[in-house]
Image: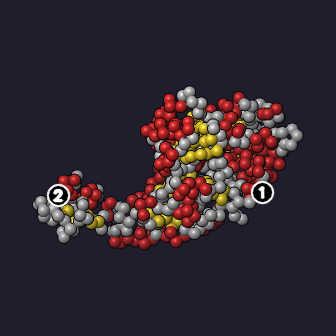
């Protein structure tokens, strides 16, 4: 029997204490011959830290929510093969269904291979696709590669959903010897962490996908533009690039061919607008990240005004699989309009938060309830925000919407890069719209008036409404401003910034009206619109509420009914939290 232990150490695992678990295990395994390895994120973020026990290459047990105190039991199980001592840590069949209902291509090696070992990546098939392409006997021409990607139907996974082959072909056909291939890893959507997880868990699949793209368009330099807020991803990618260069996959005459390509990393400063490809290019050139007018498009005049191609991490992560398995295999998954799989980051008020990769064509209900386990704390589902600040809120009535580019766009949302923020009945949709407008107003680069001024005015109106100062006509004013910003903004940030407002107005107009007309928040979430009072019949005069009120707004004698001064109350909710008799009510 040959056992090995793998500790999940993506950002989520480390934050939950995975490094401490590994440190506790290490001395217990010295001299046993049992390897202790590192893997990335398997996607089950709500169960971290996760420790996997393997016998040879077969997973024998997945242990969840592991703590350092469990190290001795885990080490003993690995030594003896007897798993009874770790039975309480073993993942439940219900939670195992999270992975069993997925189809993993971009995430195929995440949580399985060692992200810091090129040998681990190669053992899982890494670099076999580029080897096949550059083979002298059975190689593929750049045109062959582009045709394979065309047959696959792979669309850019960064949000726009533009055909990948078309962009590659346009860059290849552009005149000029100096061309560049760029990876957009500037993942800025709130609640999105798909690209980070891929780089942290399987950086070699990104490198191989980019190598194939560079070969296809004729580029000799590849650049990864990644958020500086992703230090672990950058560290592992730097290590992977170094190992790939040493192994002959990066540099001059790769694998003895005429193809040469160098790699480098650019750490971005965290500007959301740099997710727009021309703003990203400006930042790469050392200038302020602001979008360019198009045309010309990057395929003709991109980095240093040379032909360039830009795709995001997830797009490149699919490429090697497509080359190895054929474009037809990828196209066989999904819908007529949207081929293959898509990765989503499930966050918010959901039981199983993490990474999900599913074939296009599943419904929102299947992802949120079957895979994600539904809403936590027994509350009702209210809406899901798709596409981040550029997307929109989809209500419960549309839960059976099919996930593809056209069907989601018809709801007023977008696929986006894959953020999926789930909201329950306690979420105020007006506040949610305000949250995203706060974000886009702050992230506007300021180049065009419609975005610079328009998003700020939208944010101000929404702030008035949630603070109880909404006025008649505000809804109509919001709609007018949204249309003006959408039609007049220069780039995708401004053009899509009104989407969260327009979608919430479309599906939750009654909440806006309640805020404006009745000065009431139906979700009881906007503190300025809450009114706290004490039911005299239920109050026992225990004084707990008065003793815990930070502004002394509650008065009353011991064993007598208390009352709250509405003019002094700051709506903190402390009184309701400490009352054991349910006497404090919120209207």
Q: Quick one: label 2, few (<14), some, or many (20+) residues within 10 Å?
A: many
Q: Judge by depth and name the residue closer to the eye, 367 or 470.
A: 367
**Where residue 52 sits: x, y (%)?**
56, 43
Residue 192 visible in the displayed image: no
Task: Indicate which disc residue 328 carries.
Answer: 1
Indicate left or right for 450 with 184 as reference.
left
Q: Judge by depth and name the residue closer to the eye, 32 or 399.
A: 32
The residue located at (62%, 32%) in the rendering is 239
**Where residue 486 sits: x, y (%)?**
56, 61
Compared with 3, 164 (above or below) is: below
Query: Please, which colouring scheme is shown?
Result: secondary structure
The residue located at (57%, 69%) in the rendering is 400
Q: Which of the 4 image quadrants contains residue 580?
A: bottom left
**Where residue 295 sits: x, y (%)?**
69, 52
Labels 1 and 2: the sequence-earlier one: 1
Q: Judge by depth and name the residue closer to the eye, 48 or 461.
A: 48
Check the image and name the residue furthest to the top. 31
The residue located at (67%, 31%) in the rendering is 243
Helix or strand or loop: what does disc 1 sit on? helix
Task: Indicate which disc residue 543 carries.
Answer: 2
The residue located at (46%, 69%) in the rendering is 508
């Amino acid at each position: 029997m040959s056992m090995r232990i793998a500790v999940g150490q993506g950002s989520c695992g480390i934050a939950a204490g995975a490094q401490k678990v590994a440190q506790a295990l290490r001395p217990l395994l010295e001299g046993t011959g049992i390897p202790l390895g590192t893997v990335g994120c398997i996607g089950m973020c709500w169960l971290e830290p996760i420790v996997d026990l393997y016998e040879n290459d077969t997973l024998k047990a997945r242990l969840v929510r592991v703590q350092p105190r469990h190290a001795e039991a885990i080490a003993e199980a690995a030594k003896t093969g007897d798993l009874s001592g770790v039975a309480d840590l073993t993942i439940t069949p219900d939670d195992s269904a999270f992975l069993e209902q997925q189809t993993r291509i971009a995430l195929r090696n995440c949580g399985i291979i060692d992200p810091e070992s090129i040998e681990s990546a190669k053992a899982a098939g890494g670099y076999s696709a580029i080897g096949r392409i550059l083979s002298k006997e059975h190689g593929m021409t750049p045109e062959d590669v582009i045709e394979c990607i065309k047959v696959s139907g792979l669309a850019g996974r960064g949000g726009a959903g533009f055909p990948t082959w078309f962009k590659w072909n346009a860059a290849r056909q552009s005149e000029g010897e100096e061309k560049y291939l760029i990876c957009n890893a500037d993942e800025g959507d709130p609640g999105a962490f798909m690209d980070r997880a891929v780089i942290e868990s399987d950086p070699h699949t990104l490198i191989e996908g980019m190598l194939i793209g560079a070969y296809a368009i004729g580029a000799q330099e590849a650049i990864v533009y990644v958020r500086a807020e992703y230090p672990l991803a950058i560290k592992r990618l730097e290590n992977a690039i170094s190992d790939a260069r040493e192994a002959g996959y990066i540099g001059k005459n790769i694998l003895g061919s005429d193809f040469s390509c160098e790699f480098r990393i650019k750490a971005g400063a965290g500007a959301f607008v740099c997710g727009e490809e021309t703003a990203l290019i400006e930042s790469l050139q050392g200038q302020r990240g602001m979008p360019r007018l198009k045309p010309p498009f990057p395929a003709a005049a991109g980095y240093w005004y040379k032909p360039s191609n830009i795709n995001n991490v997830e797009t490149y992560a699919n490429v090697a699989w497509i080359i190895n398995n054929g474009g037809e295999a990828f196209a066989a998954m999904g819908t007529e309009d949207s081929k293959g799989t898509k990765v989503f980051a499930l966050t918010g008020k959901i039981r199983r938060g993490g990474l999900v990769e599913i074939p296009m064509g599943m419904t929102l209900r299947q992802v949120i309830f079957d895979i994600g386990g539904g809403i936590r704390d027994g509350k009702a589902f209210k809406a899901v925000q798709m596409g981040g600040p550029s997307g929109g809120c989809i209500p419960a009535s549309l839960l059976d919407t099919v996930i593809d580019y056209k069907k989601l766009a018809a709801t007023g949302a977008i696929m986006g890069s894959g953020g999926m923020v789930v909201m329950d009945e306690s979420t105020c949709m007006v506040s949610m719209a305000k949250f995203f407008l706060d974000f886009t107003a702050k992230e506007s680069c300021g180049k065009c008036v419609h975005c610079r001024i328009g998003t700020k005015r939208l944010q101000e109106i929404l702030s008035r409404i949630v603070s109880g100062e909404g006025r008649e006509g505000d809804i109509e004013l919001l709609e007018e401003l949204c249309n003006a910003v959408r039609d007049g903004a220069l780039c995708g940030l401004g053009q899509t910034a009104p989407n969260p407002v327009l979608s919430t107005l479309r599906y939750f107009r009654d909440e806006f009206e309640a805020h404006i007309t009745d000065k009431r928040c139906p979700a009881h979430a906007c503190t300025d619109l809450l009114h706290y009072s004490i039911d005299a019949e239920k109050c026992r005069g225990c004084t707990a509420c008065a003793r815990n009120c930070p502004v002394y707004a509650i008065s009353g004698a011991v064993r007598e009914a208390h009352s709250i001064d509405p003019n002094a109350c700051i709506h903190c909710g402390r009184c309701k939290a400490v009352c054991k008799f349910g006497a404090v009510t919120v209207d």
